[in-house]
């Protein structure tokens, strides 16, 4: 009886950089929720799949403890929390199902801007402030450096001017915050983006099938976002050259044009980003009437 089966739970960030885009991805994957503004739990209306809205830092633990089946969180947070959990349970791990190509950021080492940097060894014996103590420790260990880590939960970038640290390891996207605090990013500790993770819960096989289907759909939406459908007219004898320019296209469909025997219509699914440069190259190769269309759904 399917009503007695457990419902699938997906954790996403309640409010922050990943919230809107995570929700959109799930809705585009065909999930509908009874939204309730203040609640942390949104009931799935069309499928037995509910949403948990939580702080991003809580998502890895919910997954590790099997309290939800899927979660969308930054790799920076996921890896840090898995390393933390391994202190208690060395086998703790999370299965990353797919990187999602949003929430890109870098965890970087930054120093006061008047200090030069050439290699990690110069950090030996220094104090490094960070909200990512395990990732920082792993990076130091990988580089054979012993340094002190000062764990702070926020305002990491002011630690050097307060004298509580000599350097910091923090998330950087534009560097504006660093500059405002007279710091300079010098090397990358981790490159991160949001990803879809599978929790450690066990499900009955019927639910496991639904979960697989969901993951396929999410990945399909993901792929469709990058994929474009390109249509153009081309000289028949330039076909090989034109096919080679189309980014990530497999064999294009070639159709005759009624009024012209030396030109054909070409339709292709481009699975890599199509830039203006590609269109200019196509034109230079003799293509005309070039159209680039978005792809809404894709099931490969
Ligand atoms: P919460 O209240 O959920 O704990 P938060 O303040 O920790 O929120 P956000 O600032 O919303 O989190 O960032 C969430 C995630 O977005 C980060 O963990 C990181 O993966 C990603 N991210 C992308 N760009 C940046 C950036 N420039 N600075 C910080 N995080 C970024
Ligand atoms: Zn957080």
Image (cartoon, rainbow, N blue to C red):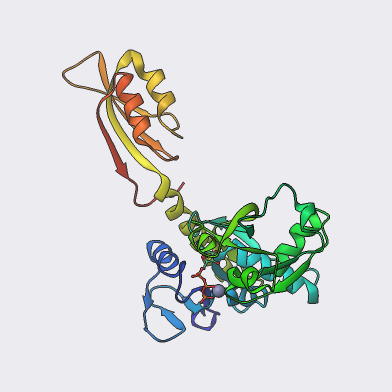
Residue pictured at 61% horizontal, 79% vertical = 67
Q: Whole-percent x and y of residue 266?
A: 31, 27
Residue lying at the far bottom in this picture: please name it.
38
Expressed as whole percent of the image width and height from the top left, the position of residue 173 reads 51, 57
Query: Image height check: is 286 above or below 123?
Result: above
Q: Where residue 246 sits: x, y (%)?
A: 40, 30
Q: Position of residue 15 (x, y in %)?
A: 44, 75
Left or right of 289, for residue 197:
right
Q: Is residue 131 visible?
A: no
Q: Residue furthest left?
A: 259
The one nearer the camera, 46 or 278, is 278
The answer to whether 177 appears left or right of 63 in the picture is: left
From the viewer's perspective, is residue 104 above or below residue 5?
above
Q: Which residue corresponds to the image point at 29% horizontal and 18% vertical from the top-left?
A: 286
Q: Is residue 101 something one can see in this rendering? A: yes
- In the rendered image of this protein, does residue 276 appear above or below residue 59? above
Residue farthest along the front direction in this orientation: 114
């Amino acid at each position: 009886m399917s009503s007695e089966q457990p419902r699938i739970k997906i954790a996403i960030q309640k409010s922050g950089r990943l919230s809107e885009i995570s929700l959109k991805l799930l809705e585009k994957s065909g999930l509908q929720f009874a939204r309730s503004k203040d609640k942390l739990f949104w009931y799935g209306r069309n499928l037995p799949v509910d949403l948990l809205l939580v702080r991003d830092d809580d998502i890895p633990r919910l997954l590790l403890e099997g309290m939800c089946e899927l979660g969308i969180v930054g790799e920076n947070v996921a890896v840090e929390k898995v390393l933390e959990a391994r202190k208690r349970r060395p086998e703790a791990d999370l299965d990353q199902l797919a990187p999602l190509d949003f929430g890109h950021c870098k965890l970087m080492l930054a120093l006061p801007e008047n200090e030069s940097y050439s290699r990690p060894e110069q950090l030996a014996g220094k104090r490094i402030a960070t909200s990512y103590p395990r990732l920082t420790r792993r990076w130091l260990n990988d580089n054979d450096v012993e340094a002190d880590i000062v764990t702070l939960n926020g305002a990491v970038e002011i630690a050097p001017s307060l004298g509580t640290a000599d350097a910091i390891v923090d998330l950087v996207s534009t560097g504006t915050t660093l500059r405002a605090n007279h710091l300079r990013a010098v090397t990358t500790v981790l490159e991160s983006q949001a990803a879809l993770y599978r929790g450690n819960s066990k499900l009955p096989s019927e639910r496991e099938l639904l979960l697989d289907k969901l993951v396929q759909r999410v990945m399909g939406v993901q792929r469709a976002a990058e994929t474009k459908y390109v249509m153009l007219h081309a000289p028949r004898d330039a076909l090989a050259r034109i096919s080679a320019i189309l980014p990530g296209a497999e064999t294009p469909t070639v159709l005759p044009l009624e009024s012209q025997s030396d030109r054909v219509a070409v339709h292709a699914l481009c699975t890599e980003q199509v830039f203006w440069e590609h269109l200019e190259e196509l034109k230079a190769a003799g293509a005309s009437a070039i159209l680039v269309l978005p792809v809404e759904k894709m099931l490969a």
